Image (cartoon, rainbow, N blue to C red):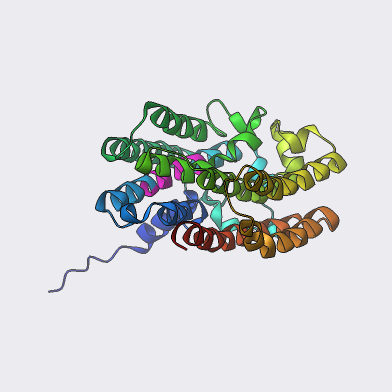
Amino acid sequence: MSLNIAASPDTKDRLNAYVKLGKLSFYDYYLSAFIVLAALPGAQTWDGTTFAVLLLYVAGYLGVVAATVALDDVTGIKDGSDARNYTPETGQLRDLSRKPLLSGALTVRQAELFGWGAMAWGALLWSVVFVIAPESSLWVGLLMVAVLVTNVQYSYGLKISYNFGQEVILVTPGLAVLIPYVLLTGEATGLVILESVLFGLWSLLVSIYSNMNDVEGDRLAGRRNLATLTTAPVYRKIIVATHLLEPVAVAVAIAVGAVPVWFAALLLPLWVLRVQQARAGVGQGNLLQARMLGIKLHRWGVPVLLLANVLALHV
């Protein structure tokens, strides 16, 4: 007699639904760990504590992000904004299967329990990180708490994204570079500060196009952000200004001596593609296409920063 211990189709479907609810396949934010590793002083790069801190930080951050997006979906299903923003017409550029509450694969109660469980997971692991980190300053710990609390309240509870805070909180992925670096070294170098700013901007240059695409549904849901509170022409100017923040940040860093001039040369190919992104979204109105290009540029930018760190520290 054989014992069949394989998961049933229902179990597999349920697990797959939770994976999609927590956006666990969206790995972009967690690439920050490689940037931190490449920015560390040589002697610290291969230290066991370094790997433990980065691994646990990323695992905890995964919980924070999963809680944020799961509870965001709960609010989206309750106020109807997800049903309006995720239509069959957007399927090619926006995967409708990533919304298991819309399909009925999960209930609102299940999503809420998952969200709070993911938050507890993130809080637990980040607490361990703070304890074992070589440099655990109080201000860094408070910053970690702030990231955890504000992200979970993004569209749930305080609903920060519904009350003028959406664009601000969307730059917090940049802290996924700054926080672990400071925990490991006790300082924030000009190079790391710049890369934190860039990493956060790259995230914003994805979501800002989503916000413009979702503007009508968000207005009906009562979300107050730059997209819903301005006209389309004004918001297009805001998008262009956001694009310009990237080269401006690099120029300022070069001017104060935080990075060498060649840093801008490394980013030049990405900026050429940024022009294409702006042309697609602002010029042609292909907002979801611009969003997809933004995701690709976020991912392609990581190896550029890795190369920059190697050149800056080891050449």
Q: Is residue 4 left or right of residue 50?
A: left
Q: Is residue 151 above or below residue 214?
A: above
Residue farthest to the bottom, as pictured: 1
Q: Is residue 168 left or right of residue 278?
A: left
The image position of residue 249, as x and y in percent, is 66, 45
Q: Nearer the viewer, residue 244 or 249?
A: 249
Residue 284, image quadrant: bottom right
Q: Is residue 175 visible?
A: yes
Residue farthest to the right, as pictured: 233
Would residue 67 be counted in the magenta stretch? yes
Q: Nearer the viewer, residue 140 or 163?
A: 140
Q: Is residue 112 left or right of residue 254?
A: left
The N terminus: image quadrant: bottom left
Q: How many labels sit on residues?
A: 0
Chief secondary structure of the magenta span?
A: helix
The image position of residue 300, as x and y in percent, is 58, 63
Residue 132, image quadrant: top left
The image position of residue 202, as x and y in percent, is 62, 51
Q: Residue at x 39, y 41 (%)?
A: 118
Q: Is residue 310 above or below residue 232?
A: below
Q: Nearer the viewer, residue 261 or 94?
A: 261
Q: Nearer the viewer, residue 85 or 172?
A: 172
Q: Residue at x 73, y 63 (%)?
A: 272
Would residue 262 be counted in the magenta stretch? no
Q: Is residue 211 left or right of residue 153?
A: right
Q: Is residue 107 visible?
A: no
Q: Residue at x 53, y 48 (%)?
A: 191
Magenta residues, as a range? Answer: 58-69
Q: Residue at x 42, y 27 (%)?
A: 139
